[in-house]
Image (cartoon, grey):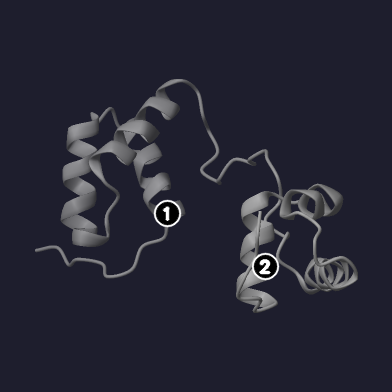
Amino acid sequence: MSRQLQVASKLEMRAEIHFLWAKRCNCTEIYRQLHEMYGENAMSRQAIAKWCNMVENGRTDIDDAERGGRPTTATNSEIAARMNENLLTNRRMAVDEIASKLYISHGKMHKITVKHLEFSKVCA
């Protein structure tokens, strides 16, 4: 009789996928075993199939890969303070002008203005 584990990290499940793949189990068998062990907390069938394909293509590490793109640090107090200063200096400055000046997106600009600085009316 086996016990179901309540908590599992992504890394644990990825390691088990690697292990079961090395034992020549197919994706369906891996899915069945993970769901038997972790129940609802197990990876989805699509995620398991994706990892099986990556292992088959030679991936050996189970850590998350580095991703490109803009860092998510646009909403910090320094940016908010600089934005507040720009808005108070020239209230007719367009959102896009300030966003390009601070090197952040239009959406982040709007989010910081409305949620952090609590301005209720912001024009484009």
Residue 104: tell me if it is visible: yes
Q: Residue at x 86, y 51 (%)?
A: 101
Q: Residue at x 70, y 45 (%)?
A: 70
Marks 2 and 1 sit apart, C-alpha to C-alpha, by 32 Å
Q: Residue at x 42, y 54 (%)?
A: 10
Q: Residue furthest left?
A: 1
Residue 22: tell me if it is visible: no
| Relative horizontal placement of residue 88, taking residue 5 as reference (left or right) | right
Residue type, mark 1 in image: Lys
Q: Residue at x 74, y 49 (%)?
A: 96
The image quarter containing residue 4 is bottom left
Estimate the x, y position of residue 124 in percent, counting from the top left.
66, 53
Name the residue carrying label 1. 10
Estimate the x, y position of residue 56 in percent, counting from the top left.
40, 23
How many labels were placed on the picture? 2
Name the residue carrying label 2. 112
Q: Residues within 10 Å of mark 1 (few under 14, many from 20)?
A: some
